[in-house]
Image (cartoon, grey):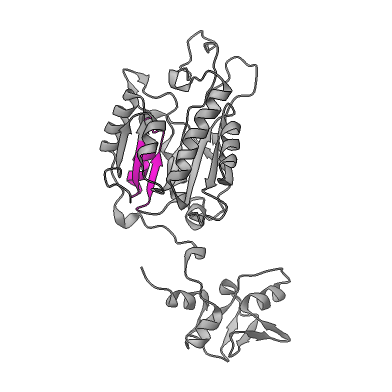
Amino acid sequence: MISSTLKNKIINGDSLKELKKIPDESFDLIFADPPYNLQLRNKLIRPDRSKVNAVNDKWDQFESFKTYDEFTHKWLLECKRLLKKNGSIWVIGSYHNIFRVGAKIQDLGFWILNDVIWNKNNPMPNFRGTRFTNAHETLIWASKNKDSKYTFNYQSLKCLNDDLQMRSTWNLPICNGNERLKKKGQKVHSTQKPEALLHRVILASTNKNDFILDPFLGSGTTAVVAKKLGRSFCGIEKEKLYFEAAIKRIKNSKIIEDEYLDTIQNNRSKPRIPFGSLVELGVIKPGTEIYDQKKKVNAKIMVDGSIKYQKSEGSIHKVAAKILGAESCNGWTYWHYQSGNTLIPIDELRERLRPKN
């Protein structure tokens, strides 16, 4: 049972200790932005001799790769325990750590679904000119195990991308401008993530009222976006400065009005309704003619829900595919019925049978 004291709360403490206090299977989603272990040895200097504010914080420093791997194993093990059976986890990192983290993810039995490249529109230049400009970070998305029925809001992501399938390369700017938290002119957090990145992650893999954990909350981006999108959150942050900044930031953020939080439902999450059910229930009668969109092809519906077109017979999908000479075809959108002077996709008839929320 999830303690109500965890919902919409952030904790100032060590993740390895605090995670152990949380009940099993509490969260629908975990987003983790762990220390990258950048191992920076020298100061970074711009051509004008000014110093670059790179990541050189103590929390990002580990004695060795072995120490870092042990740390990674411990927090990932706790996260797996805390995920619901159909939950998923996102972990973000750079080339310094993401491959080591990915190996641990697989070792612990998570099931990797995608690696996503966050291509930064405005990356920091490479001032020394000794290697390629580091212009991306990698996110690993994994379900709790290979049998998890994880959430993926395919239709919403497609809509977000102008009705094109969302690819695993995301072009988004780094956190800048008014969104970047500053104190006395200096960045509060050296690796603050942009809200746009978390918006996409949370929209893709959660539903309204889901519960999200961020074990390395930093400046609070995950919690802020979760709140805006009508999700519950729990965050853990060790550094007092970041914790206090996150508290203030979350308090000042506003949830989007509930009526605007609805998203397009995935077809695969809707109850399956065979075409034959429409015939059985009298929604459409045997003998009814159905057509392609241009009314150049017509077929007749049989009593068992099959259709006949010339010498072809079979399901709405099989016959449509044969007409098109294709391996497959979605008959629900290919075939239309006539209502007055209008041709309407038969998919509309299926929608009438689906329960309304």
- Residue 317 percent coordinates (x, y): 63, 75
- Asked which quadrant contains residue 169, the reply is top right
Foreground: 238 or 90?
238
**Residue 217 at x, y percent in the picture:** 39, 33
Q: Is residue 228 covered in magenta?
A: yes
Against 207, residue 7 (above or below) is above
The residue nearer to you, when weighing 328 against 33, is 33
Say which quadrant the C terminus sits in.
Answer: bottom left
Total numbered labels: 0
- Give yes or no for residue 1 being in the magenta stretch: no
User: In the visual, does 226 lie left or right of 272?
Assistant: left
Residue 12 in view here: yes
Which residue sits at x=51%, y=9%?
48
Q: Give the range drawn in magenta.
A: 209-235
Question: x, y (%) of residue 279?
Answer: 52, 86
Q: Horizontal placement of 168 versus 219: left or right?
A: right
Q: Establish if 2 lies above or below 96.
A: below
List the single residue furthest toward the top.
Answer: 49
Q: Is 117 drawn above or below residue 188 in the view shown? A: below
Asked where in the image residue 265 lies, by quadrant, the reply is bottom left
Residue 242 spot, x, y in % from top left: 34, 26
- In this orientation, does residue 122 appear? no
* Residue at horizontal 50 percent and vertical 42 percent from the top: 90
On screen, residue 197 above or below 296: above
